[in-house]
Image (cartoon, helix red, strand yellow):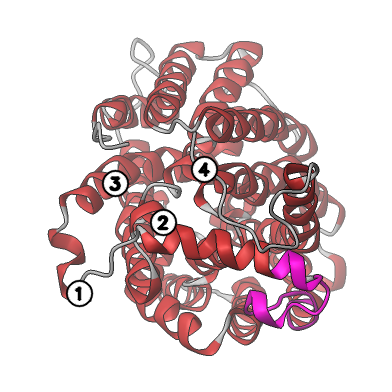
């Protein structure tokens, strides 16, 4: 196990040193992580609520599945192009102001989605939404490196990223309820209200960012001097072993390339679940919007528990590689099972729950890899580069799944929507082979 950082004379040697350390990091986690997780819930909800809105939106606007797939995927193009610059700016100007700016921008654009009427408008707003949101997630990952040493980071990252399954757990029933309850209220369709109402929380949360977040440890007046020194010493010890390679050399580093290669298919699987889970549940036999929303929440509920337990286990054992391999194999198994569930609604929900537990548990552990050996502006750029290139998997999965939807329906073949998951299987199941023995 890694050794604890050297403490100041007034702390080192105390019989309660480890209790003091645990209490310090618990205090930091309680201040930042629940709030950041709430922000991520809203961010992810604004990103994938189109999956619920799609149930009525396509018919109302007369959009094809291909147009939907392209528009949903264009989010990731905008996201990819602006992620690295966004992270570098945040590293320079500080997390408080930059994350608040990001949240205000994406909240406004998410609300504008309610008023698109043509495919071109749909494509434009989705692209701009990706531009606006770029930097939030990698920015938070970078921010956590300022406050938590690597040995503690998988668990807190898992709790933060629990925002993904919680967004599905709460968002799917909420979106389904809004879709039906607010249909034709004020003369607007239910899917329009989904975008407007779910965008509203971003504005007060953006104000909360300015009040709750602290840019650097030295500025944390809510910590005692001994607590600040403990954290600064731990982070300094981590930084001592980190590399600062030229920004132009990031993509020539084989360790980073391996991380991108295994993260790309994981993102394909993650966003297929995010965008098409309600459709898969509907195709398996669910009828009403509320029923679809409630059943779509079950896989995310399972994933919340799984990702926190896996992150805690990885930190406790100081091991990353086999944890990553195991959870991706679990995710791949769930995808296979969902293909053959067919019209059996119970089996479909169970298999999708297994898939979600594996796939969603991937990122918290993965992000401990690059932040373990890179620091400073290099880490900021690397996190942005990994996330932006890996998130191209979101674009590929959206566009490819839309093309699968256009295939002729054959009663003797696998269901078309389930075939989306079969398409993801080879890339998803190969992920465990990619981590280097260095980890």
* First to last magenta residue range: 208-228
Q: Nearer the observer, disc 4 or disc 2?
A: 4
Report the residue marked by disc 2. 371
> Where in the figure is residue 274, as x and y percent of width and height?
54, 44
SS of the residue at dot 1? loop
Q: Name the N-terminal-most of marks 2 and 3.
A: 3
- Which one is in front, 128 or 34? 34
Report the residue marked by disc 3. 259
Q: Name the N-terminal-most of marks 1 and 3.
A: 1
Mark 4–mark 2 distance (CA, rounded to whole Å): 18 Å
Mark 1–mark 3 distance (CA, rounded to whole Å): 18 Å
Residue drawn at 74 percent across, 47 percent down: 17
Mark 2 touches mark 3? (CB < 8 Å): no
> Where in the figure is residue 312, as x and y percent of width and height?
62, 33
> Where in the figure is residue 294, as x and y percent of width and height?
77, 34
Side of 259 relative to 188 (left or right)? left
Q: Is residue 370 above or below residue 405?
A: below
Q: Name the N-terminal-most of marks 4 and 1.
A: 4
SS of the residue at dot 3? helix
Q: Is residue 269 above or below residue 223?
A: above
Q: Nearer the observer, disc 1 or disc 3?
A: 1
Residue 3 badge: 4
Residue 223 in sight here: yes
Q: Is residue 178 above or below residue 259?
A: below
Report the residue marked by disc 1. 246
Residue density around tag 3, few if under 14, some if 14–19, many if 20 or more, within 10 Å: many
Question: Please, which residue is most extreme toward the left here?
Answer: 252
- Which one is in front, 391 or 12? 12
């Amino acid at each position: 196990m890694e050794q604890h950082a050297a403490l100041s004379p007034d702390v080192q040697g105390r019989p309660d040193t480890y209790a003091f350390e645990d209490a310090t990091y618990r205090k930091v986690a309680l201040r930042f992580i629940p709030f950041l997780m709430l922000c991520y819930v809203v961010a992810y909800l604004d990103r994938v609520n189109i999956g619920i809105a799609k149930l009525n939106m396509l018919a109302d606007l007369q959009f094809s599945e291909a147009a939907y797939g392209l528009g949903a995927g264009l989010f990731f193009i905008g996201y990819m192009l602006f992620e690295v610059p966004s992270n570098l700016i945040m590293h320079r100007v500080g997390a408080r102001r930059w994350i608040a700016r990001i949240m205000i921008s994406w909240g406004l654009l998410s609300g504008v989605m309610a008023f698109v009427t043509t495919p071109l408008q749909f494509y434009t707003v989705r692209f701009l939404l990706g531009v606006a949101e770029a930097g939030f997630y990698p920015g938070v990952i970078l921010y956590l490196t300022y406050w938590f040493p690597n040995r503690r980071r998988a668990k807190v990252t898992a709790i933060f990223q629990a925002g993904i399954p919680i967004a599905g757990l709460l968002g799917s029933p909420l979106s389904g309820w809004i879709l039906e309850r607010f249909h034709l209220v004020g003369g607007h369709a239910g899917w329009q209200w989904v975008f407007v109402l779910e965008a509203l929380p971003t504005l007060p949360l953006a104000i909360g960012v300015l009040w709750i977040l602290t840019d650097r440890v030295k500025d944390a007046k809510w910590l005692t001097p001994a607590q600040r020194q403990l954290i600064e010493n731990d982070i300094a010890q981590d930084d001592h072993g980190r590399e600062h390679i030229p920004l132009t050399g990031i993509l020539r580093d084989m360790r980073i390339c391996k991380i991108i290669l295994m993260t790309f298919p994981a993102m394909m699987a993650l966003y297929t679940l995010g965008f098409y889970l309600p459709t898969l549940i509907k195709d398996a036999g669910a009828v009403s919007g509320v029923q679809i929303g409630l059943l779509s929440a079950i896989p995310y509920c399972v994933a919340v528990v799984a990702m926190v337990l896996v992150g805690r286990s990885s930190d406790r054992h100081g091991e990353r590689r086999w944890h990553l391999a195991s959870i991706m194999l679990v995710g791949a198994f769930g995808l296979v099972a969902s293909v053959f569930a067919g019209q059996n609604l119970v089996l479909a929900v169970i298999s999708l729950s297994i898939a979600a537990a594996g796939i969603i548990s991937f990122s918290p552990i993965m992000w401990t890899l690059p932040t373990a050996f890179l620091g400073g502006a290099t880490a900021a750029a690397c996190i942005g580069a990994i996330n932006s290139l890996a998130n191209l998997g979101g674009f590929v999965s959206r566009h490819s799944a839309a093309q699968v939807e256009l295939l002729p329906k054959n009663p003797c073949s696998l269901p078309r929507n389930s075939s989306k998951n079969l398409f993801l299987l080879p890339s998803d199941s190969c992920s465990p082979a990619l981590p280097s023995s260095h980890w």
